[in-house]
Amino acid sequence: MDRHDFTPERISELARSINQRLGDSIGAIEDVNDDIHVLSINAKIQAARAGTAGAGFAVVADAVRKLVTRTQGITSNLQAQVEKTLGDLMSMNETLSHRVRGQRLAQVASTAIDIVDRNLYERSCDVRWWATEDALIRALTHRTPQNLRQASRRLGVILDSYTVYLDLILCDLDGRVQANGRPERWSSAGTEVAQQEWFQSARRTASGTEFGFEGVHASPLVGGKSVLVYSCVVRKGGETQGDPVGVLGIVFDWDALGTVVADRAKATLATETERAVNVVLAYPDASVVASSDRDLQGTRLNLKLWDTIEQKKMGFFDGPGPGGAQVLAGFAVSAGFETYQTGWYALAMEDRS
């Protein structure tokens, strides 16, 4: 037998086959018993006609009839016992299958959110490192056209090596963009960003070891694309306690991570089942930030679903999913990586309706 045959579905199929074959065999035995029973009756009739000479034959006929009755009792009892045992086996197998599948969905969810955490940890490191670039500091402290062009070129060099970013934005302390790494594509110089969360959160930091952040949003800086922005204050001398001279914002292409992670996790699960599956990444408030089902992007998950998830860090459950469909959902909350943790959730859901 191939190792792929050792599945809960295959076990259920074999149990049903055993039950069917047992029923067929017992039915055949009962047919034979009926024939023997008829023969015993005919034999008793013939014995009665033979009078005294047939008395011994009548005793044999009675014995045969009693054996038929006992056989019928044995087969009925056997059928009842086997049907109960097979029923218990199928029930246990279904429970085991449910548990194994739920754990598998939770495992995929955990892997998905771990990939996100690891990737975004690198983003938090990138922005703090690049904020110490001498070309950026010089452009903000001596704001000449030449220095600004040099800063833009330097940002462009970084972008050539880090293709996960759509652009890098250099601002003064008032929130006006002074230079960016892709000026030929995104004309953001002169744009006011003082009201953006990524700018304000960076300005609230106390040292160069900290960073600012703005979650998934459509950014006008890059044509309305879906992005995350990490930010850090640029400080004199590149020192962590140096005086602030501006803010660097790095514009991360969210679709290249979030959507890809959700799609690949779904593709993995789809090879294991014929049921519809969907993988979702969500904020702690249940807002969907990425989904293999594009219609869920930007929506908020069912509250009953979310209440169950918030009780544990990782697990699975049956319940109403998006749109009210019954789902088996595996989930995991961000465990974080190194010093970084999104606090987001991943869910892998299989339609059970």
Image (cartoon, rainbow, N blue to C red):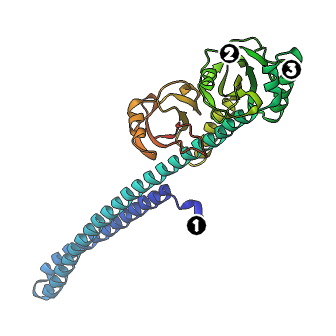
Q: Could you tell whether 113 is left or right of 24 in the image?
A: right
What element does badge 3 sit on? helix
- In the depicted view, which residue is nearer to us: 181 or 240? 240
x 85%, y 30%: residue: 157
What element does badge 2 sit on? loop
Q: Do the residues labelled 3 and 2 touch (CB within 8 Å)?
A: no
Check disc 2 and report the residue beneath it.
Answer: 175
Q: Position of residue 327 (x, y in %)?
A: 44, 39
Q: Where is residue 97 in the image (x, y as percent from the top left)?
A: 45, 54
**Dot 1 alpha-carbon crowd within 10 angstroms: few under 14, some 14 to 19, many 20 or more:** few
Closest to the camera, between mark 3 and mark 1, is 3
What element does badge 1 sit on? loop
x 63%, y 37%: residue: 263
Q: What residue type is labelled 2?
A: Gly
Q: Position of residue 226 (x, y in %)?
A: 65, 24
**Dot 3 alpha-carbon crowd within 10 angstroms: few under 14, some 14 to 19, many 20 or more:** some
- In the depicted view, which residue is nearer to us: 325 or 205? 205
Q: How far apart are marks 3 and 2 (CA)?
A: 18 Å
The answer to which quarter of the image holds residue 154 is top right
Q: How far apart are marks 3 and 1 (CA)?
A: 72 Å
Q: Position of residue 215 (x, y in %)?
A: 59, 27
Q: Could you tell whether 10 is left or right of 121 in the image?
A: left
Check disc 1 and report the residue beneath it.
Answer: 1
Check disc 3 and report the residue beneath it.
Answer: 147
Q: Which amino acid does label 1 sit on?
A: Met
Q: Which of marks 2 and 1 is nearer the N terminus?
A: 1
**For the C terminus, which image quadrant?**
top left
